[in-house]
Image (tube, rainbow, N blue to C red):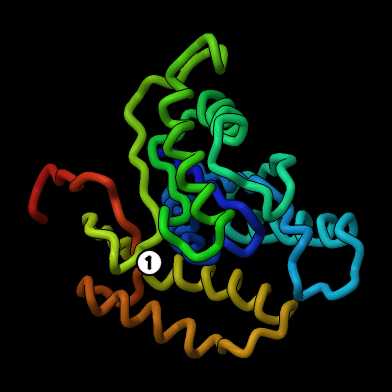
C-alpha cells in the first residue's frame, strides 16, 4: 500500500504521523507533500520569510525521516492557497507519478483558509491525475481520500489503530515541534487525546479521519 499525505504547512502532518509510521513499519510506502513552506508563521516574529522557509523545510524533512516517509515541497506561497486549478494540477502530477492508494489531507471546513484549500485542491487533483493530457502517464487506479475529522461534517469516521509503535513515532514528531515552538500543550495531553480516540474505537491509541464514502471490509474480524 502507498499512502500520500498532502498538507499546506510543516507540522500539519502531526495528526497522521502515527498512521504513516505504522504503515511504514509494515513495509508500506508513505510520502508527505507540503504545498508551502509555511514562511509566514507568526511564531518566528521578525525572522525574514526566506529564513523561516528554510527552517520549516528542514523540519519537514526531519519529521519525514522520523516517520520513514518520503518528503516533497511544492512552491506555493504561504497563506495564498485558493484550492484552484494550479494547486490541483501540481498535486495531480505528484499523484500521477507516485501512484498512492490512499491520500490524506485537511478537512474542507477548517478555520485556516490554506487548510480548506488543501482539501479542495486535493479533491480536484484526484480527477486531474486520471487525465494524460494534464499529467502525462495517468494514475487511473482507485484512490481513497481521507481527511482530518471534524464533528460537524456528516461523513463516515475512520479510526486507525496506530498501536504503541505508531504512537511512539507520533509522540516523537509532536515532541520535536512542541520543543521548537515551546507549545503549552503537553506531551501528556497529546497522549491522553489519542488514548481517548483509541477508547472510542476499542484500541489503545488511534488517529481519526473521515471518508467521503463508507469503507467496505472483506470480513467482520
Question: Quick check: 187 above or below 141?
Answer: below
Q: How crowded is mark 1: few (under 14 residues within 10 Å), some or many (20 or more)?
A: many
**Looking at the image, which residue sits at the far left?**
220
Q: In this view, does 159 lie above or below 2?
A: below
Q: In this view, does 9 lie to the left or right of 21?
A: right
Count of numbered badges drawn on the protein: 1
Picture quarter with the N terminus: top left
Q: Is mark 1 on a helix, strand or loop?
A: strand
Q: Is residue 30 visible?
A: yes
Furthest residue in direction top, as rendered? 133
Task: Note whether residue 28 is visible.
Answer: no
The residue shown at (73%, 53%) is 37
Pinpoint residue 170: horizontal percent, then vertical percent: 52, 69
Q: Locate residue 184, reporting x and y percent.
A: 62, 90
Q: Quadrant of residue 196?
A: bottom left
Q: Which residue is more in the foreground, 141 or 123?
A: 123
Q: Residue 219, image x and y in percent?
A: 9, 47
Residue 63: where, in percent of width, then height? 65, 60
Query: Is 143 in front, or is 38?
Result: 38
217 or 126: nearer the eye?
Answer: 126
Indicate whether 191 appears above or below 146.
below
For the point 50% across and 11% down, which residue is it?
Answer: 132
Q: Residue at x 54, y 42 (%)?
A: 83
Which residue is at a point 39% across and 36% down the rendered structure image?
101
Q: Which residue has dot 1 on it? A: 207
Quarter placement of the C terminus: bottom left
Amino acid at each position: 500500500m502507498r499512502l500520500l499525505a498532502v498538507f499546506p504547512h510543516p507540522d500539519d502532518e502531526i495528526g497522521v504521523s502515527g498512521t504513516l509510521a505504522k504503515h511504514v513499519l509494515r513495509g508500506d510506502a508513505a510520502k508527505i507533500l507540503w504545498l508551502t513552506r509555511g514562511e509566514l508563521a507568526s511564531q518566528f516574529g521578525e525572522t525574514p520569510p526566506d529564513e523561516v522557509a528554510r527552517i520549516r523545510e528542514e523540519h519537514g524533512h526531519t519529521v519525514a525521516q522520523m516517520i520513514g516517509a518520503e518528503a516533497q515541497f511544492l512552491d506555493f506561497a504561504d497563506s495564498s492557497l485558493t484550492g484552484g486549478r494550479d494547486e490541483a494540477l501540481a498535486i495531480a502530477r505528484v499523484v500521477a507519478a507516485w501512484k498512492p492508494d490512499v491520500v490524506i489531507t485537511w478537512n474542507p471546513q477548517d478555520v485556516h483558509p490554506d487548510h480548506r484549500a488543501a482539501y479542495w485542491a486535493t479533491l480536484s487533483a484526484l480527477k486531474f491525475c486520471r487525465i494524460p493530457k494534464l499529467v502525462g502517464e495517468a494514475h487511473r487506479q482507485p484512490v481513497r481520500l481521507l481527511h482530518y475529522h471534524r464533528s460537524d461534517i456528516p461523513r463516515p469516521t475512520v479510526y486507525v489503530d496506530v498501536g504503541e509503535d505508531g504512537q511512539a513515532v507520533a509522540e516523537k514528531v509532536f515532541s520535536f515541534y512542541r520543543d521548537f515552538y515551546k507549545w503549552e500543550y503537553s506531551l501528556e495531553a497529546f497522549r491522553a487525546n489519542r488514548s481517548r480516540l483509541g477508547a472510542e474505537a476499542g484500541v489503545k491509541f488511534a488517529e481519526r479521519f473521515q471518508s467521503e464514502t463508507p469503507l467496505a471490509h472483506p470480513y467482520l474480524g
